[in-house]
Image (cartoon, rainbow, N blue to C red):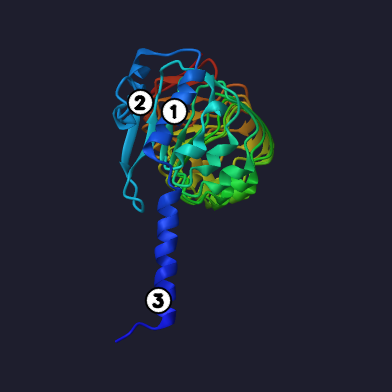
Amino acid sequence: MEASPLLLLVSLTLLLATFLQAKAVPSLQDQAGALLAWKATLQSHPAQLQSWSRGNNTSTRPCSWYGIKCRKHQVSHQEVITGISLRGLRLRGDLDALNFTALETLTSVQLSHNKLTGRIPPSIVSLKELRFLLLRRNQIRGPLSPALASLTKLQYLMLQQNELFGEIPRQIGELEGLVKLNLSANHLSGPIPGELGYLNKLSMLDFSSNNLTGPIPRNLGNLTRLTILYLSGNYLSGYLPRELGYHVNLKDLDLSKNILIGSIPNSFGSLINVNVLALWHNQFSDNIPRELGYLVNLKELYLNMNKLNGSIPSTFGNLTKLTIFYLHDNKISQYLPRELGYLVNLRKCIYGIIHFPGVFLGN
């Protein structure tokens, strides 16, 4: 039985597409050349990079070089570079000098704890298979490009402790596969984009120690897989969204050193797995919600340096795992409920010079 012309055309089209895709993949030697060209621009050459050389043998394979991982490409079936891991080598040089276009098969880039400068290269958007971008603790400058949203397979985006500035692009909210997002200790400004609420796979979000302003978006309440949320050390203002109380998997929540106002939401009593709750150095007022006494896994509670009033709820006697409790610099009543005597694990508690049966609340 003869194949129909249409079937033949479809088969030839698929075959041609596969051929073109395989042909487009850079060769291993081209990728090695890109790495060697970057190495030549570095101001320091640690001993680990001595293996980065073709030597006298032109067949030297980059897959045996320090910090380089390879595997066979799924389409071309040729060996390609998929990983660079050069953490903590004190590399000095410009990240922009690395030709990522020739390394488009990378799935992991680990260059943390170096002294790399320059911007995040525009060519990085060529890495369509990239899952891990780890550039922590360098001297990388410039704004974050909205084009990073084209890295649709990205799971870890760790850019903390650099010199990034400008606003966080709202397009980051399109990276639906993100599990960890850390932009802390930079110079980022402007608001937290509400679009980040679409990143429903996030387990860690850290924007601490920047210059962010505006309110905390209510959409962050959608991130129910979060275990760590750090927004401390910014200039965030407005009321605390009650939606943050939906984070039932949250273990660490740090919103300290901002200018947040109003009441602490009663919904925070639903954070049943939280170990650390840091709300200090804000402008929270009104009473301490009695619902905080339901956080039976709480180990550290920081409510100091606010404008809280009223008294300590008797429900705090349930917090038997509490080891640290700071409440100073508020307007709390001197009355202490007898239930605080149940806090047998309390080690540090600053409230005032007050003795109470079972506990010492002193400086």
User: Where does the image place residue 170, in percent across and percent down from the top left?
Assistant: 64, 46
Question: Which is closer to the viewer, label 1 or label 2?
Answer: 1
Q: Earlier in the sequence, mark 3 or mark 2?
A: 3
Q: Please say if the residues under marks 3 and 2 sit with CB atoms less than 8 Å apart.
A: no
**The quarter of the displayed image where residue 33 is located:** top left
Look at 61% across and 34% down and name the residue there. 310
Amino acid type at mark 3: Leu
**The quarter of the displayed image where residue 48 is located:** top left
Look at 39% across and 64% down and name the residue there. 15
The residue labelled by disc 2 is 345
The residue labelled by disc 1 is 35
Comparing 30 with 226, the one in front is 30
Comparing 69 with 302, the one in front is 69
Q: Is residue 181 left or right of residue 68?
A: right
Other residues around mark 3 within 10 Å, as few (<14) / some (14–19) / many (≥20): few
* Helix, strand or loop status at disc 1: helix
Question: Which is closer to the viewer, label 3 or label 1?
Answer: 3
Q: Earlier in the sequence, mark 3 or mark 1?
A: 3
351 is higher (above) or lower (below) than 74: above
Give the CA separation, mark 3 to mark 1: 42 Å
- Pick out the residue farthest to the bottom: 1
Comparing 40 with 145, the one in front is 40
Q: Could one spot residue 252 in this view of the protein?
A: yes
User: Where does the image place residue 11, in percent across and percent down from the top left?
Assistant: 39, 71
Q: Name the mark on residue 8.
A: 3
Q: Please say if the residues under marks 1 and 2 sit with CB atoms less than 8 Å apart.
A: no
Give the CA separation, mark 3 to mark 2: 76 Å
User: Where does the image place residue 93, in percent across and percent down from the top left?
Assistant: 53, 19
Look at 44% across and 28% down and name the residue there. 35
* Helix, strand or loop status at disc 3: helix
User: Where does the image place residue 111, in percent across and percent down from the top left?
Assistant: 45, 26
Q: Is residue 16 left or right of residue 1?
A: right
